[in-house]
Structure formats: C-alpha cells, structure tokens
Amino acid sequence: MILFWGLRGAKWWAALTALSCGLLLFSNLIYFSGPQPRFLWEKGELAHSPAWLAAFYFHIVGASLCLAAGLPLMFPRWTKKYPLWHRWLGYVYLTAVLWMAAPSGVALAFTAKGGAPATVGFALAGVLWWYTTWSGYRAIRRGQIAEHIRAMVRSYSLALSAPAFRIIQAALFLAGLGDATNYVVSLWLSIAVSVLLAESCLHRVRGSGAFITRPLSPLGELS
C-alpha cells in the first residue's frame, strides 16, 4: 500500500487499514436498519429535518463509497495490473468525494457536536478533502501522473480520518477522557494523523525518486 511504502511492517499497517475501513463500513449499516442510532437521537429536532437528514445520508453513503472504492487504488501493483478498474473506481471515488461526502460534510459541520472547535475541524477537513481530490482530477486530465498520485495520496489519507477518528475516540474513552472533550480532541488528532500520513509517505517516495523519473513505472514497485 503506497501510504505505508518504506515503513517497517508496511503490510501489517495496510491490513489494519483495510480492516478498519471494513469495520467502519459495516458499522454504517446501523443508519439504514433497526432502531434509531444514538448519534441521531442526540441531534434532537435536527434528526427530523428533511434537509439535514438528506445531507447526513448523502455524507454516509458518499464516505462509504469513497473508502471502499479508494482502498484498491492505494495498491499500485493492482492499479497497474487492472487499469480499467483503476479508471472506473477512480470515477466512483471522485463522484463520492466531490459531489457527496465532502460538500455534505462541510454542511453538517455547522451543526457538529462539540461547538466551534468541532465545526472548524470538520469544515477544514471537508474543504481540504474536496480540494486535494479536485487537484488529483485536474492533474490526471492534464496527463500529470506524478501530481495526480500526490494529490490522491493526500485525498485518501483524509478519507482515512474517519476510521482514525473512531479508533482515537475509543482509545481516549478507555483512557477516561470526558465525552465532549474526547470528541473534539479525537477529531483534530485524526486530521493531524491523516495529514502526517500523507506527507510522510510523499516525503519517502519523493526521496526515492519514484515521482521524478518515469512516473508510471514505479507504480508497480510501490506495494
């Protein structure tokens, strides 16, 4: 997985990432069946607003699609072997982020639990996610392969802030941190972890020269 290229235990980190994405996708099913989840009943009257509910479900579906579609795209050997699948999954990912998950996430940020710090955090994450994804799309349309890879590494790292948020939140809960503080701290830590993951990956790959010479060929080597 390109995000962990050059790190010790990269295959284990990739497996844990895939597992966390799978668990998050499975947990999202609670919003489509059974009794009303805690997150929704905590929202009170908002949970009965058609506009808010539309944004919420747009976000849940879009985020689920982008996590699922984007994961295979982070394995360069796979994308090189199946270029047609790469293209179609790329379209799914772009649509899910640009027109569903990121815009609705920014809209939902204004009613986020945790007040202004949470609103700023979610809005910032949504804007960065949209911008990096759009940058990746523009780069590939121009034939700028290396720039496309950099942008999409940043984009998918931000997508992974969702499972990171839940993992950090669970860890801080077990450590005894209060719910309100935990929520805001977990949010900002998950954004920081996502940015650090992307930039450290790009630094390692850039240092190897993989994005400088023959940008297409190294894609099969970064596993």
Image (cartoon, rainbow, N blue to C red):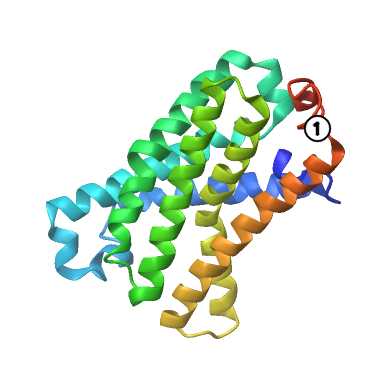
Mark 1: give few (<14), some (14-19) or many (20+) Cα within 10 Å.
Answer: some
Give percent across and percent down for residue 78. Answer: 69, 24
Query: Residue 174 vs residue 101: left or right?
Result: right
Give percent across and percent down for residue 200. Answer: 73, 52
Q: Residue at x 13, y 57 (%)?
A: 49
In this rendering, does residue 97 appear at all?
A: yes
The three-letter code of the residue at mark 1 reads Ala
Count the labels in the image.
1
Query: Residue 123 vs residue 188: left or right?
Result: left
Look at the picture and state if 24 lies above or below 73.
below
Query: Residue 17 vs residue 203: left or right?
Result: left
Give percent across and percent down for residue 92. Answer: 44, 28
Seen from the viewer's position, the closer of residues 143 and 122 is 143
Q: Quadrant of the C terminus?
A: top right
Seen from the viewer's position, the closer of residues 3 and 165 is 3
Q: Which residue is mark 1?
A: 210
Secondary structure of the residue carrying numbered label 1: loop
Q: Residue at x 79, y 33 (%)?
A: 222
Seen from the viewer's position, the closer of residues 83 and 37 is 83
Give percent across and percent down for residue 208. Answer: 86, 38
In this rendering, does residue 33 appear at all?
A: no
Q: Residue at x 18, y 70 (%)?
A: 44
Query: Residue 163 vs residue 37: left or right?
Result: right
Q: Residue at x 55, y 70 (%)?
A: 170
Seen from the viewer's position, the closer of residues 102 and 178 is 102
Q: Quadrant of the N terminus?
A: top right
